[in-house]
Image (cartoon, grey):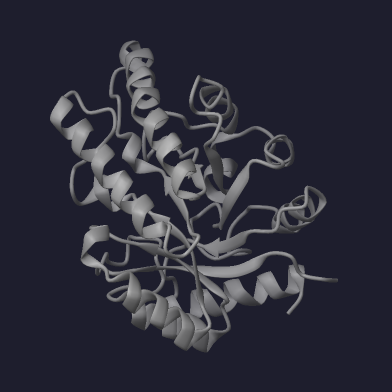
């Protein structure tokens, strides 16, 4: 079988700890080198401050290792910096938008996807959800146009209830992306979140055909594929059926260790899509 997808792994500049689903932490260049050593072809980078990284140095690291930067994760802007596009504080919303533009500027150097997850923030009160969705749309519309102008693909991620109470299911996310100005935004799908939130994983994947810009492999327990209850044979078959040809990236817990989780995850990917 001719493989169309690219095998990736999550790495970070920061030390995020054992609870973060990022296997190689504490340096982008070191993470890229480790990914290359293990046989990955691309990485997604999780960074707290895009201005702290030198694009020239990152391009050099990519050339030296043969590992492509496929995506940039922005969740640390919420988790570590306290920024969100739905904050009750307009100044925080404004700063969140500025930081997303900085991530897009960095991604433009590599043709990487910028994905939006926790930057949506949290609502907290169901009665206020429509207001928060309006804020989110207001924040995303100019970012979508900015990314398109820069030639940078984007991906909005449906996330499970324990991360946020905004846009949990695939259907909710697709409906939200019908709003004016948001049609340009793609989807990042994560098997962990789909398993927890959607009734039918196959239906969810198929209805997103042509819209997926990045893909996370993560089991029901947030571990490497086959460590939990997700039907990954189904996932591989459907992604092939719908013609997905982007990165499939491990965003999983470092259990039993980061290297072992990466090894087992990559072994499954190769069994599904070939060497």
Q: Is residue 257 visible?
A: no
| Residue 79 percent across, percent down from the top left | 25, 48
Counting from the top left corner in percent of width and height, residue 267 is at: 65, 77
Is residue 200 shown to the viewer in this render? Answer: yes
Quadrant, the N terminus: bottom right
Residue 31, x across and y down, in percent: 39, 78
Q: Is residue 215 above or below residue 253?
A: above
- The residue lying at 67 percent from left, 38 percent from top is 208
Residue at 77% across, 50% down: 238
Which residue is drawn at the image coordinates 44% and 35% (left, top)?
145
Who's the residue at 54% across and 25% down the image?
172
Residue 180 image position (x, y, % from top left): 50, 20
Q: Which residue occupies the extreme top position in the image?
A: 127
Q: Is residue 64 above or below residue 72?
A: below
8 vs 57, left or right, is right
Query: As displayed, is residue 128 above or below residue 144?
Result: above
In this rendering, position of residue 211 left or right of residue 88? right
Most distant residue in the front direction:
149
């Amino acid at each position: 079988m001719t493989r169309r997808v690219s095998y990736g792994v999550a790495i970070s500049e920061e030390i995020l700890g054992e609870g973060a689903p990022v296997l190689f932490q504490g340096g982008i260049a070191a993470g890229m080198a480790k990914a290359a050593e293990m046989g990955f072809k691309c990485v997604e980078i999780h960074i707290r401050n895009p201005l702290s990284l030198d694009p020239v140095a990152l391009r050099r690291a990519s050339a030296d290792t043969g590992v492509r930067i496929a995506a940039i994760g922005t969740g640390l802007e919420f988790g570590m910096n306290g920024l969100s596009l739905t904050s009750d504080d307009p100044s925080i919303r404004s700063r969140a938008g500025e930081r997303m533009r900085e991530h897009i500027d960095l991604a433009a150097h590599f043709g990487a996807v910028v994905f939006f997850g926790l930057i949506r923030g949290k609502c907290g009160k169901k009665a206020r959800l429509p207001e928060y969705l309006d804020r989110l749309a207001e924040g995303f519309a100019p970012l979508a146009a900015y990314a398109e102008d820069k030639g940078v693909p984007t991906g909005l991620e449906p996330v499970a209830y324990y991360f946020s109470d905004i846009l949990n299911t695939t259907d909710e996310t697709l409906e939200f992306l019908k709003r004016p100005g948001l049609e340009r935004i793609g989807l990042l799908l994560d098997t962990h979140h789909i398993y927890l939130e959607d009734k039918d994983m196959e239906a969810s994947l198929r209805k997103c055909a042509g819209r997926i810009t990045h893909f996370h492999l993560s089991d029901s327990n947030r571990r490497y594929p086959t460590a939990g209850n997700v039907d990954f044979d189904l996932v591989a078959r459907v992604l092939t059926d719908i013609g997905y040809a982007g990165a499939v990236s491990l965003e999983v817990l470092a259990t039993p260790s980061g290297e072992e989780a990466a090894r087992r995850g990559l072994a499954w990917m190769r069994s599904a899509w070939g060497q």
